[in-house]
Image (tube, coloured by chain):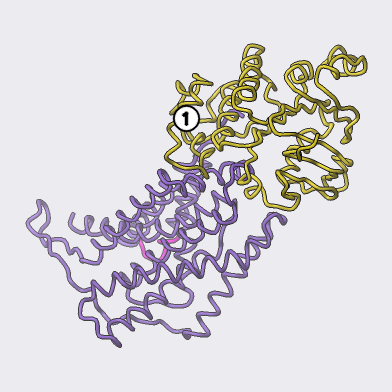
Amino acid sequence: MENFVQQIINGLTLGSIYGLIAIGYTMVFGIIGMVNFAHGDVFMVSTFIALILFLALTQLLGLPSIYLALFLVLVAAMVLTSLWSWAIERVAYRPLRGSFRLAPLISAIGMSIFLMNFVQVTQGPRNKPLPPMFNDVIQLSGLPGAANGITLAWKQILIMAVTAVLLCVFWFVVQKTALGRAQRAVEQDRRMAALLGVDVNRTVSLTFVIGAALAAVAGTLYLVQYGVVRFDDGFIPGVKAFTAAVLGGIGSIPGAVLGGLLIGLIEVLWSAYVSSDYKNVAAFSVLIVVLIFMPSGLLGRPEVEKV
Amino acid sequence: MSAAPLLSLDGVEARYGSIAALKGVDVRVDAGEIVALIGANGAGKSTLMMTIFGEPRASRGRIVFDGRDVTNMQAHEIARLGIAQSPEGRRIFPRMSVWENLRMGAALGDPSAFDQDCERMFAIFPRLKERLHQRGGTLSGGEQQMLAIARALMTRPRLLLLDEPSLGLAPLVVKLIFEVIRDLNRQHGLTVFLVEQNAYHALQLAHRGYVLVNGAVTMSGPGRDLLARPEIRAAYLEGGH
């Protein structure tokens, strides 16, 4: 029993990270109908930005509080990663808008390869560790049915809390602010939004920026949770997050989060109870099964609308 | 005609790929006027409306709004100069509520004026108030048309472009919408440029009219004069729809 609860917590932690990345995929797809294959690598870049900042703050500057350091790293990583993503959109995608449909996809794959190689060349090909920092745990004991208690790492609570808070903020922005409305308008009818004075290019840029900021949060939390990053760390989490977005219904933001949590849980539970060798197979099999019965994903909207 | 027109198109050509949709169109809309452009399906009416907003771009000719050459400006920049459009197909944001659609119309305006402007729209189209929290995509065609016009008006335009406001609507709704256009023009001096297949209603309403045939203007003049012309009667009124 305690093992099960422990695994659920681990799964939700991992799922939060996937969910944050998945939002970037789903928003970009929603607004310009493109799968941004470089998004996973943007996430990877953010883990390196976070690592470098952490080391600079704690080792070089000797900041005493690691939680203060974490806060600063989080903010700085969001800003810097957003700049990367903004530049990527400007250089690699915008010039191709209005071109044939596959052009931006191919450009995105190229950008993915570029980012991976850029980091490999500048940071080296090996694992880059963060010195152990977030080791505090809470032992929950005396729960009914739990003999040995459950180990809840502070960092896991942190990850879930940061994810939940950011999702609320983000949800508010998309649903209630002029920026969010403009974004949804561009998503639903780009031309009409322009006729009402919405600067479509600026709105698309902002979508990339927001997606990258959330990926940077995921990247920082990923570093905190696993403590090691590598130049190709964008690939598998990127594919998983994309899977999460499709599973939840691509274009749907709540769907992306739900999909992320599900993929995280499936992966962790499968590893714990069946075999860790086939955890990816399990996650992707669920995707296939869901898509057979619900082609637009769990929370995707069915394409019925009056015109 | 001493004053400069609010909108003028001089020799505007536009094409879709190799197909010429507009072949040198000259149109003038003065401030305070209602101008109608009539023509059959495929004559290029909607293309003309979209070309004013730069898509498709005029490949030749000049479009001037209020003394500014807008021929090569971006759509959102043109909108910000004070032109609003209720486009072909109405293009309501389907997954936004009526309120949000109106809010999009007011996206550039002063937020404090929003509630007041909304009340004005409800006075014109009470139906919209009843449907305020319903999603745009679930409205009936007539309601969508009302919303499209209201959304355009929320931008507080100096020039309102209406593309087929009567298309697919019940006669009573058509009557209502044409009355609204007339009132807005008479009471608020709103300049309106509308495109219609419904030539009879449009020319009755308009101060002046243009007839577009195969991408070129073939006739123009005061609305009632055009209505009296036998060739117009034959082509657009008696011959079918």
Q: Which residues are magenta?
A: A275-280
Residue at point 40%, 59% (across, down) = A18
Residue at point 28%, 86% (across, down) = A61
- Tell me, by letter, which chain the rendering colours purple: A
- Residue B88 appears in view: no
- Residue B181 appears in view: yes
Residue at point 70%, 34% (across, down) = B31
* Quadrant position of the N terminus of chain B in the picture: top right
Q: Residue at the far front: name it.
A: B2
Is A190 situated above or below B131? below
Is A162 situated above or below B79? below
Q: Amino acid at mark 1?
A: Cys
Residue B148 drawn at (x, y percent): 59, 30
Q: Residue at the far right: name it.
A: B231
Q: Is residue A261 left or right of residue A98?
A: left
Return the chain for callout 1: B
| Residue B181 drawn in magenta | no
* Quadrant position of the C terminus of chain B in the picture: top right
Residue A90 drawn at (x, y percent): 60, 65
Is disc 1 surrounded by few (<14), some (14 to 19) or many (20+) residues within 10 Å? many
Residue at point 65%, 14% (across, down) = B175
| Residue A276 drawn in magenta | yes
Name the image quarter holding residue A210. Answer: bottom left
Residue B2 drawn at (x, y percent): 79, 37
Would you name the residue on which mark 1 appears?
Answer: B118
**Magenta span: helix, strand or loop, mainly?**
helix
Q: Is residue B196 left or right of residue B95?
A: right
Q: Nearer the viewer, residue B156 or B88?
A: B156
Per the image, label 1 sits on a secondary structure element best described as helix
- Chain B on-screen colour: yellow
